[in-house]
Image: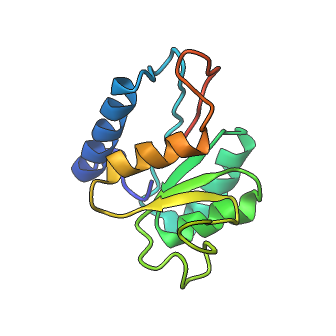
């Protein structure tokens, strides 16, 4: 995430996201694992952080900003990416269309109701995954 670990706004987003996951039955340490990478200096460290995340073999990467999306896309052509904070994902060439993002991007979410939208998009990425039968799920 393109924030410092102690950024209050970022913490609010993550708390809302985690709360919604819990409401859906996903429990950290039980059936979901989340690996955070806080990168306020993402312009200079984005590629290294993306490579580090891809090396963890995550099921999905959750990120923000076009730069970080591109860095993850470059690091892996197969890890699904859920992202927000990209003004024109289609126009910038990061995805093919909103209906069929392609390029390993699962989908995008707008700033409005970000945590709910990201949770819904992530569920679509794992359309067969349910908390009771999922061995784990990592996002960063």
Residue at figure coordinates x 39%, y 31% from the top left: 21
Visible residue check, residue 125: yes
Residue at figure coordinates x 31%, y 63% from the top left: 111
| Quarter of image, res 105 | bottom right
Taking depth in this image into account, of 38 and 104 the one nearest to the observer is 104
| Quarter of image, res 68 | bottom right
In this view, 106 is above or below 27? below
Residue at figure coordinates x 61%, y 22% from the top left: 134
17 left or right of 88 in image: left
Residue 121 pos. (x, y %): 48, 49
Residue 55 pos. (x, y %): 74, 43
| Quarter of image, res 139 | top right
**Figure disc tally:** 0
Residue 2 pos. (x, y %): 43, 59
Residue at figure coordinates x 33%, y 54% from the top left: 114
Q: Residue furthest right?
A: 77
Visible residue check, residue 140: no
């Amino acid at each position: 995430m393109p924030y410092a670990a102690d950024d209050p706004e970022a913490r609010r987003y993550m708390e809302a996201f985690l709360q919604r996951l819990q409401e859906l039955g996903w429990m950290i340490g039980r059936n979901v694992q989340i690996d955070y990478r806080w990168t306020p200096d993402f312009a200079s460290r984005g590629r290294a952080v993306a490579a580090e995340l891809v090396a963890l073999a995550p099921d999905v990467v959750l990120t923000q900003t076009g730069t970080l999306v591109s860095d993850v896309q470059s690091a892996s052509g197969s890890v699904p990416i859920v992202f927000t904070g990209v003004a024109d994902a289609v126009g910038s060439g990061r995805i093919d269309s909103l209906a069929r993002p392609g390029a390993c991007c699962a989908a995008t979410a707008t700033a409005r109701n970000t945590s709910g939208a990201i949770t819904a998009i992530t569920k679509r990425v794992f359309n067969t995954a349910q908390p009771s039968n999922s061995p784990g799920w990592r996002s960063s």
